[in-house]
Amino acid sequence: MTVVYGVTRYGGRLQIEKRLRELSDFPQEFVWQASHYLVRQVFNSLQEMFSSTRAIQRWLTESARLIARSGLAVEWVTPLGIPIIQPYHHDSKVSISGGIQSLTFCSSGDTNQKPNTLKQKNGFPPNFIHSLDSSHMMLTALHCYRKGLTFVSVHDCFWTHAADVAVMNQVCREQFVRLHSQPILHDLSRFLVERYCSGPRSTNAQVAKLQEMLLSVPKTGTFDLDQVKHSTYFFS
């Protein structure tokens, strides 16, 4: 799960090490070697099984890195038209001198400071996916309302009265297919190019590199979205 949040092999190895130490019958003297071996296998398997997903994640990460290095925060608009801006900037320090001592306060989220490149690039993939998930939730809520259903949601848990679960399940799947049938990545690419690569900035060599990256939209996989409508456990 933490792969989409930018976990490194080092962080992945620590997670595996923690689980191995919980196994009473596993030889503890081999924990380091085993975790080092297993993390390689896990990352290689993820790359092989989810090649399209990993390519998209790399594209989002690298795009955000180049945007932040150009001095701007990453922003985009969800499929429902809601603007998103990542508030990750370097901390600003404020010093207050008194008669007895001096105090220094760190203020985060100061938009006058340069964007924090590390947080911008690591945050973009999961935040972008969360913005799609929230769009799906809002579409489900709106269409449940039109059908007269009571709808409650907390994060990715959707609730309604027991008698209406079957209808909500249908609406939930239909709206997921509807949302993800849109050219989401190409729409994002067009928005980012217009936002960050147009006007006087377009002649900058760094911006030209960013534009090249933004236009290199990864190919999607072969997943048949329509099958979601017939999947019992896609949402359960």
Image (cartoon, grey):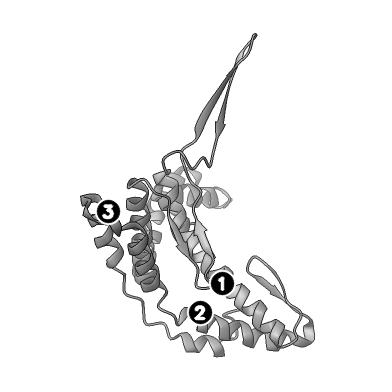
Specify whether 203 is left or right of 194: left
At label 1, the amino acid type is Ser
Q: In this view, does 60 lie above or below 139?
A: above
Residue 124 placed where, x, y %?
44, 57
Q: Do the residues labelled 2 and 3 touch (CB within 8 Å)?
A: no
What residue does disc 2 label? 179
The quadrant of the picture occupied by the C terminus is: bottom right
Q: Do the residues labelled 1 and 2 touch (CB within 8 Å)?
A: yes
Q: Residues within 10 Å of mark 2 (few under 14, many from 20)?
A: some
What residue does disc 3 label? 200
Q: Residue at x 45, y 82 (%)?
A: 181
- Disc 1 and disc 2: Cα gap in Å? 8 Å
Q: Can residue 1 be seen in this view?
A: no
At label 3, the amino acid type is Pro
What residue does disc 1 label? 135
Q: Is residue 227 above or below residue 11?
A: below
Q: Which of marks 2 and 3 is nearer the N terminus?
A: 2
Of 23 and 208, which appears nearest the observer? 208
